[in-house]
Amino acid sequence: MIEIRPCTDDADDEESLAIYNAVWPWDAVSMHEVRSWRTQVTEWADFLAPGAGSADVALTPWHPGIGQAHVCVLPGQRRKGVGTALYHAVSGWLSARGIDVLDVTVPEDDPASVEFAAKRGFHEERRSERLVLDLTGLEPPPIAPPKGIEIVTWAERPDLIQGIYEVAAESAPDIPGEEDAVVESFEDWLAHDMHGSGDRPEATFVALAGDEVVGYAKFSLTAAQPTTAHHDLTAVRRAWRGKGIAGALKRTQVAWAKEHGYERLVTVPDLRNEPSRRMNQRLGYQPAPGKIFMRGPLAER
Protein backbone atom coordinates (compact mmCIF):
# COMPACT_ATOMS: atom_id res chain seq x y z
CA MET A 1 0.00 0.00 0.00
CA ILE A 2 1.29 3.47 -0.91
CA GLU A 3 1.69 5.79 2.06
CA ILE A 4 0.46 9.35 1.45
CA ARG A 5 0.49 11.78 4.34
CA PRO A 6 0.18 15.54 4.79
CA CYS A 7 3.45 17.32 5.48
CA THR A 8 3.33 18.21 9.15
CA ASP A 9 6.88 19.15 10.16
CA ASP A 10 10.16 20.54 8.83
CA ALA A 11 11.49 17.11 7.89
CA ASP A 12 8.44 16.42 5.73
CA ASP A 13 8.72 19.85 4.15
CA GLU A 14 12.38 19.32 3.31
CA GLU A 15 11.76 15.91 1.74
CA SER A 16 8.79 17.21 -0.25
CA LEU A 17 10.87 20.12 -1.56
CA ALA A 18 13.80 17.86 -2.44
CA ILE A 19 11.48 15.74 -4.59
CA TYR A 20 10.03 18.81 -6.29
CA ASN A 21 13.52 20.15 -7.04
CA ALA A 22 14.58 16.78 -8.45
CA VAL A 23 11.60 16.74 -10.83
CA TRP A 24 11.84 20.47 -11.66
CA PRO A 25 15.60 21.21 -11.48
CA TRP A 26 15.38 24.36 -13.58
CA ASP A 27 12.59 25.64 -11.32
CA ALA A 28 14.34 24.67 -8.07
CA VAL A 29 13.62 26.85 -5.04
CA SER A 30 14.73 26.97 -1.43
CA MET A 31 12.57 26.50 1.64
CA HIS A 32 12.72 30.27 2.10
CA GLU A 33 10.80 30.69 -1.18
CA VAL A 34 8.31 27.99 -0.20
CA ARG A 35 7.50 29.77 3.05
CA SER A 36 7.19 33.06 1.21
CA TRP A 37 4.78 31.48 -1.30
CA ARG A 38 2.62 30.17 1.52
CA THR A 39 2.09 33.72 2.79
CA GLN A 40 0.84 34.78 -0.65
CA VAL A 41 -1.85 32.16 -1.25
CA THR A 42 -5.29 31.86 0.31
CA GLU A 43 -4.78 28.30 1.56
CA TRP A 44 -2.30 25.50 0.86
CA ALA A 45 -1.34 21.92 1.66
CA ASP A 46 1.57 19.60 0.89
CA PHE A 47 1.45 15.80 0.67
CA LEU A 48 4.33 13.34 0.82
CA ALA A 49 4.81 9.81 -0.45
CA PRO A 50 8.04 9.13 1.49
CA GLY A 51 10.94 8.32 -0.79
CA ALA A 52 8.77 8.46 -3.90
CA GLY A 53 6.81 11.63 -4.55
CA SER A 54 5.19 14.80 -3.28
CA ALA A 55 2.40 17.20 -4.19
CA ASP A 56 1.61 20.79 -3.33
CA VAL A 57 -1.81 22.34 -3.79
CA ALA A 58 -3.06 25.88 -3.19
CA LEU A 59 -5.95 28.25 -3.61
CA THR A 60 -4.83 31.68 -4.76
CA PRO A 61 -6.42 35.14 -4.71
CA TRP A 62 -5.61 35.73 -8.38
CA HIS A 63 -7.33 32.56 -9.67
CA PRO A 64 -10.22 32.05 -7.24
CA GLY A 65 -12.23 28.87 -7.54
CA ILE A 66 -9.44 26.88 -9.20
CA GLY A 67 -6.92 24.66 -7.43
CA GLN A 68 -3.26 24.99 -8.40
CA ALA A 69 -1.03 21.94 -7.93
CA HIS A 70 2.22 20.20 -8.76
CA VAL A 71 2.26 16.40 -8.53
CA CYS A 72 5.85 15.14 -8.55
CA VAL A 73 7.07 11.53 -8.67
CA LEU A 74 10.75 10.58 -8.78
CA PRO A 75 11.70 8.86 -12.07
CA GLY A 76 12.50 5.52 -10.45
CA GLN A 77 9.15 5.45 -8.62
CA ARG A 78 6.82 6.03 -11.54
CA ARG A 79 4.17 3.61 -12.82
CA LYS A 80 3.65 2.27 -9.31
CA GLY A 81 0.52 4.24 -8.42
CA VAL A 82 2.28 7.05 -6.53
CA GLY A 83 1.08 9.80 -8.86
CA THR A 84 -2.47 8.53 -8.75
CA ALA A 85 -2.43 8.40 -4.95
CA LEU A 86 -1.10 11.96 -4.73
CA TYR A 87 -3.73 13.13 -7.24
CA HIS A 88 -6.42 11.62 -5.03
CA ALA A 89 -4.97 13.36 -1.96
CA VAL A 90 -4.96 16.73 -3.72
CA SER A 91 -8.49 16.11 -5.04
CA GLY A 92 -9.81 15.26 -1.59
CA TRP A 93 -8.33 18.42 -0.13
CA LEU A 94 -9.91 20.58 -2.86
CA SER A 95 -13.27 18.81 -2.71
CA ALA A 96 -13.50 19.51 1.01
CA ARG A 97 -13.23 23.21 0.12
CA GLY A 98 -15.88 23.15 -2.58
CA ILE A 99 -13.42 23.30 -5.49
CA ASP A 100 -13.90 20.99 -8.49
CA VAL A 101 -11.37 22.35 -11.04
CA LEU A 102 -7.62 21.74 -10.89
CA ASP A 103 -4.73 23.31 -12.78
CA VAL A 104 -1.47 21.38 -12.98
CA THR A 105 1.87 22.17 -14.58
CA VAL A 106 3.74 19.52 -16.57
CA PRO A 107 7.26 19.66 -18.09
CA GLU A 108 7.01 19.92 -21.86
CA ASP A 109 9.74 17.30 -22.32
CA ASP A 110 7.99 14.73 -20.10
CA PRO A 111 5.47 12.98 -22.37
CA ALA A 112 4.67 10.36 -19.74
CA SER A 113 3.41 13.06 -17.37
CA VAL A 114 1.41 14.71 -20.15
CA GLU A 115 -0.18 11.33 -20.90
CA PHE A 116 -0.88 10.75 -17.19
CA ALA A 117 -2.83 14.02 -16.98
CA ALA A 118 -4.63 13.55 -20.32
CA LYS A 119 -5.89 10.10 -19.30
CA ARG A 120 -7.52 11.69 -16.27
CA GLY A 121 -9.41 14.27 -18.28
CA PHE A 122 -6.95 17.16 -18.28
CA HIS A 123 -6.53 19.32 -21.37
CA GLU A 124 -3.89 21.83 -22.34
CA GLU A 125 -4.84 25.39 -21.41
CA ARG A 126 -1.65 27.09 -22.51
CA ARG A 127 2.04 26.49 -22.99
CA SER A 128 5.17 28.50 -22.25
CA GLU A 129 8.59 28.10 -23.72
CA ARG A 130 11.77 28.48 -21.72
CA LEU A 131 14.43 30.84 -23.07
CA VAL A 132 17.93 30.90 -21.59
CA LEU A 133 20.64 33.51 -22.01
CA ASP A 134 24.19 32.37 -21.23
CA LEU A 135 25.99 35.30 -19.62
CA THR A 136 29.42 33.69 -19.44
CA GLY A 137 31.60 35.45 -21.98
CA LEU A 138 28.74 37.75 -23.01
CA GLU A 139 29.39 41.45 -23.51
CA PRO A 140 26.11 43.11 -22.47
CA PRO A 141 24.59 45.27 -25.20
CA PRO A 142 24.19 49.02 -24.66
CA ILE A 143 21.05 49.82 -22.69
CA ALA A 144 20.15 52.68 -25.06
CA PRO A 145 16.75 53.73 -23.65
CA PRO A 146 14.44 55.70 -25.95
CA LYS A 147 14.77 59.47 -25.92
CA GLY A 148 13.14 60.97 -22.85
CA ILE A 149 13.17 57.69 -20.89
CA GLU A 150 15.23 57.22 -17.73
CA ILE A 151 15.72 53.85 -16.05
CA VAL A 152 16.23 53.72 -12.29
CA THR A 153 15.90 51.02 -9.64
CA TRP A 154 13.07 50.80 -7.17
CA ALA A 155 15.75 50.88 -4.47
CA GLU A 156 16.82 54.31 -5.71
CA ARG A 157 13.23 55.59 -5.95
CA PRO A 158 10.97 53.81 -3.42
CA ASP A 159 8.45 56.60 -3.91
CA LEU A 160 7.60 55.19 -7.36
CA ILE A 161 5.79 52.15 -6.00
CA GLN A 162 2.26 53.48 -6.68
CA GLY A 163 3.21 54.12 -10.30
CA ILE A 164 4.69 50.62 -10.57
CA TYR A 165 1.41 49.19 -9.30
CA GLU A 166 -0.57 51.17 -11.87
CA VAL A 167 1.59 49.71 -14.65
CA ALA A 168 1.09 46.20 -13.25
CA ALA A 169 -2.68 46.61 -12.93
CA GLU A 170 -3.02 47.94 -16.48
CA SER A 171 -0.74 45.31 -17.99
CA ALA A 172 -1.99 42.18 -16.20
CA PRO A 173 -5.06 41.57 -18.43
CA ASP A 174 -2.84 41.84 -21.52
CA ILE A 175 -0.50 39.00 -20.53
CA PRO A 176 -1.34 35.85 -22.53
CA GLY A 177 -2.56 33.19 -20.15
CA GLU A 178 -3.39 35.70 -17.43
CA GLU A 179 -6.37 37.41 -19.04
CA ASP A 180 -8.75 36.22 -16.32
CA ALA A 181 -6.41 36.77 -13.40
CA VAL A 182 -7.71 38.98 -10.59
CA VAL A 183 -5.68 42.15 -9.97
CA GLU A 184 -5.18 42.47 -6.23
CA SER A 185 -5.49 45.65 -4.20
CA PHE A 186 -2.39 47.77 -3.87
CA GLU A 187 -1.63 46.50 -0.35
CA ASP A 188 -2.01 42.83 -1.29
CA TRP A 189 -0.07 43.25 -4.54
CA LEU A 190 2.74 44.96 -2.66
CA ALA A 191 2.96 42.12 -0.14
CA HIS A 192 2.64 39.30 -2.68
CA ASP A 193 4.37 40.61 -5.80
CA MET A 194 7.02 42.97 -4.50
CA HIS A 195 7.95 41.75 -1.02
CA GLY A 196 8.36 38.04 -1.69
CA SER A 197 11.56 36.22 -0.84
CA GLY A 198 12.82 36.45 -4.43
CA ASP A 199 12.03 40.14 -4.87
CA ARG A 200 14.76 42.75 -4.44
CA PRO A 201 14.31 46.51 -4.92
CA GLU A 202 17.80 46.82 -6.37
CA ALA A 203 16.87 44.20 -8.99
CA THR A 204 13.61 45.94 -9.96
CA PHE A 205 14.04 48.44 -12.79
CA VAL A 206 11.65 51.30 -13.50
CA ALA A 207 11.24 53.26 -16.75
CA LEU A 208 10.36 56.92 -16.23
CA ALA A 209 9.11 59.56 -18.66
CA GLY A 210 9.69 62.60 -16.52
CA ASP A 211 7.90 61.74 -13.29
CA GLU A 212 5.57 59.17 -14.85
CA VAL A 213 6.23 55.45 -14.40
CA VAL A 214 5.71 53.98 -17.87
CA GLY A 215 7.16 50.50 -17.35
CA TYR A 216 9.14 48.21 -15.09
CA ALA A 217 10.94 44.87 -15.05
CA LYS A 218 11.87 42.67 -12.13
CA PHE A 219 13.75 39.49 -11.36
CA SER A 220 12.79 36.55 -9.16
CA LEU A 221 15.90 35.29 -7.37
CA THR A 222 16.45 32.17 -5.27
CA ALA A 223 19.27 30.80 -3.17
CA ALA A 224 18.57 27.38 -4.71
CA GLN A 225 19.91 28.70 -8.04
CA PRO A 226 22.58 31.23 -7.03
CA THR A 227 23.96 31.66 -10.55
CA THR A 228 20.59 31.93 -12.35
CA ALA A 229 18.29 34.95 -12.38
CA HIS A 230 14.70 34.38 -13.47
CA HIS A 231 12.76 37.10 -15.25
CA ASP A 232 9.53 37.70 -13.37
CA LEU A 233 7.63 40.41 -15.24
CA THR A 234 8.32 43.09 -17.82
CA ALA A 235 5.39 45.49 -18.21
CA VAL A 236 4.84 48.72 -20.12
CA ARG A 237 1.80 50.98 -20.11
CA ARG A 238 -0.33 50.60 -23.22
CA ALA A 239 0.23 54.16 -24.44
CA TRP A 240 4.01 53.66 -24.29
CA ARG A 241 4.32 50.29 -26.01
CA GLY A 242 6.16 49.89 -29.29
CA LYS A 243 8.73 52.54 -28.40
CA GLY A 244 11.57 50.28 -27.26
CA ILE A 245 11.01 50.64 -23.51
CA ALA A 246 10.65 46.90 -22.83
CA GLY A 247 13.87 46.21 -24.71
CA ALA A 248 15.76 48.83 -22.73
CA LEU A 249 14.47 47.37 -19.48
CA LYS A 250 15.53 43.87 -20.55
CA ARG A 251 19.00 45.11 -21.55
CA THR A 252 19.27 46.79 -18.14
CA GLN A 253 18.54 43.44 -16.52
CA VAL A 254 21.19 41.71 -18.64
CA ALA A 255 23.79 44.27 -17.61
CA TRP A 256 22.83 44.09 -13.92
CA ALA A 257 22.91 40.28 -13.85
CA LYS A 258 26.29 40.16 -15.57
CA GLU A 259 27.72 42.75 -13.18
CA HIS A 260 26.45 40.82 -10.15
CA GLY A 261 27.97 37.48 -11.15
CA TYR A 262 24.99 35.62 -12.56
CA GLU A 263 25.81 33.07 -15.27
CA ARG A 264 22.43 32.74 -16.96
CA LEU A 265 19.03 34.36 -17.31
CA VAL A 266 15.81 32.40 -17.75
CA THR A 267 12.43 33.59 -18.97
CA VAL A 268 9.27 31.57 -19.68
CA PRO A 269 6.98 33.58 -22.00
CA ASP A 270 3.67 32.17 -23.12
CA LEU A 271 3.89 30.87 -26.69
CA ARG A 272 1.27 33.45 -27.69
CA ASN A 273 3.37 36.36 -26.41
CA GLU A 274 5.06 37.06 -29.74
CA PRO A 275 6.49 40.52 -28.87
CA SER A 276 8.23 39.12 -25.80
CA ARG A 277 9.53 36.08 -27.64
CA ARG A 278 10.93 38.17 -30.50
CA MET A 279 12.61 40.60 -28.11
CA ASN A 280 14.27 37.78 -26.18
CA GLN A 281 15.44 36.09 -29.36
CA ARG A 282 17.02 39.35 -30.58
CA LEU A 283 18.99 39.47 -27.33
CA GLY A 284 20.34 35.95 -27.88
CA TYR A 285 18.12 33.85 -25.60
CA GLN A 286 18.11 30.21 -26.67
CA PRO A 287 15.07 27.89 -26.51
CA ALA A 288 14.82 25.04 -24.01
CA PRO A 289 11.90 22.75 -23.00
CA GLY A 290 9.13 24.73 -21.34
CA LYS A 291 5.92 24.07 -19.42
CA ILE A 292 2.44 22.86 -20.28
CA PHE A 293 -0.40 24.21 -18.15
CA MET A 294 -3.28 21.72 -18.02
CA ARG A 295 -6.76 21.97 -16.49
CA GLY A 296 -9.00 19.12 -15.47
CA PRO A 297 -11.32 17.49 -12.95
CA LEU A 298 -10.71 16.12 -9.51
CA ALA A 299 -10.17 12.40 -9.10
CA GLU A 300 -13.32 10.37 -8.83
CA ARG A 301 -13.84 9.04 -5.35
Image (tube, rainbow, N blue to C red):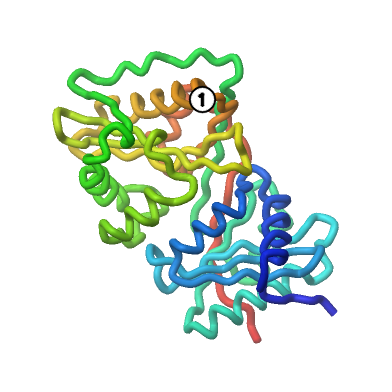
Front one among 186 and 281: 186
Q: Quadrant of residue 298?
A: bottom right
Q: Is residue 204 above or below residue 70?
A: above
Does residue 150 appear left or right of residue 8 in this picture?
A: left
Front one among 22 and 223: 223
Q: Amino acid at mark 1?
A: His
Q: Residues within 10 Å of mark 1 (few under 14, many from 20)?
A: few
Residue at horizontal 21 percent and vertical 37 percent from the top: 213
Residue at horizontal 26 percent and vertical 60 percent from the top: 185
Q: Is residue 208 above or below residue 17?
A: above
Does residue 81 appear left or right of residue 132 in this picture?
A: right
Where residue 279 sits: x, y (%)?
41, 28
Front one among 68 and 295: 68
The residue to which callout 1 is attached is 260
Q: Quadrant of residue 255?
A: top left
Where residue 179 sits: x, y (%)?
34, 56
Instruction: State which quarter of the image contains the C terminus.
Output: bottom right
Does residue 295 appear left or right of residue 176 in this picture?
A: right
Q: Is residue 224 above or below residue 52?
A: above
Q: How many numbered circles does the render carry?
A: 1
Residue at horizontal 60 percent and vertical 32 percent from the top: 227
Where residue 278 sits: x, y (%)?
43, 29
Does residue 8 appear left or right of residue 206 in this picture?
A: right
Residue at horizontal 51 percent and vertical 13 percent from the top: 139
**Could you say whether the residue bearing mark 1 is in a helix, strand or loop?**
loop
